[in-house]
Amino acid sequence: MTKSNLRSTQERNTNYILDNLLTYKDSKGPHHWSILLGQSSREERWRQTWVSAVDVPNVEESWYVSQGTRDAGSYNEDGDRNAGLSYFTRGTYDFDNKYLLTATFRADGSSNIKPNGAIFPQWAWDGF
C-alpha cells in the first residue's frame, strides 16, 4: 500500500458591522433644527489552524491526520483581529428655509493604530 503526506487546514473568518443612528427634528415658527447621533462598531477576525502527518494510507477512507504519524512541528495556528469604534453627530439649523448652518463631529478608535506599542487603540477626531 502506498503512503502519502497529508495536511489538514481549517480557516475561520468573522466580520461584523453594527451601526446605530438616532435622529431628532423639531421646529418653531421659522426656526428648524435637527440632530443626528450615531455609533458604529466593526470587527474582523481571521484564524487558521493546520496539522500535518506523514505515512497516511493513500486511500480516501483514511485521509485523516490521525491515520498517519505526526511530528512535533506538524501543528500551527495563526490569526488576526482588527476592531474599530466610531461616534459621530451632526446638527443642523435653518431659519425660514433660507439660511442653513451645519456642524459635524466624528471620533474614530481603531485597534490597528497603536502608538509606541500601546495595547489600547488610538483615537482620532474631526469636527467642523
Image: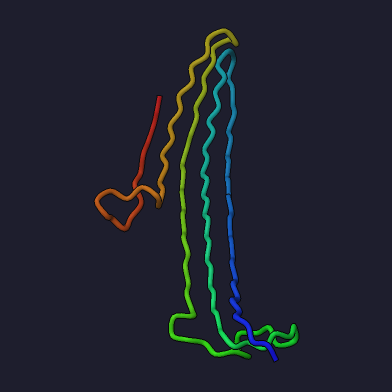
Quarter of the view holding residue 2: bottom right
Closer to the camera, 39 or 42? 42
Q: Is residue 73 left or right of residue 6?
A: left
**Coordinates of residue 112 in the picture (x, y in percent):** 40, 50
Q: Residue furthest top?
A: 98
Above or below residue 91? Residue 3 is: below
**What quarter of the picture does the N terminus occupy?**
bottom right
Give me the residue at 50% from left, 29% from top. Answer: 90
Outermost residue, front side = 2
> Residue 3 location, x and y as percent?
64, 87
Q: Which residue is drawn at 65% across and 84% down?
A: 64
Residue with the most extreme left position: 116
Q: In the rendered picture of this protein, how many numbered marks are placed on residues?
A: 0
Q: In this view, does 49 lie above or below 57?
A: above
Q: Position of residue 25 (x, y in %)?
A: 59, 29
Question: Which of the pair 122/86 is nearer the observer?
Answer: 122
Residue at the location (52% across, 51% down)?
42
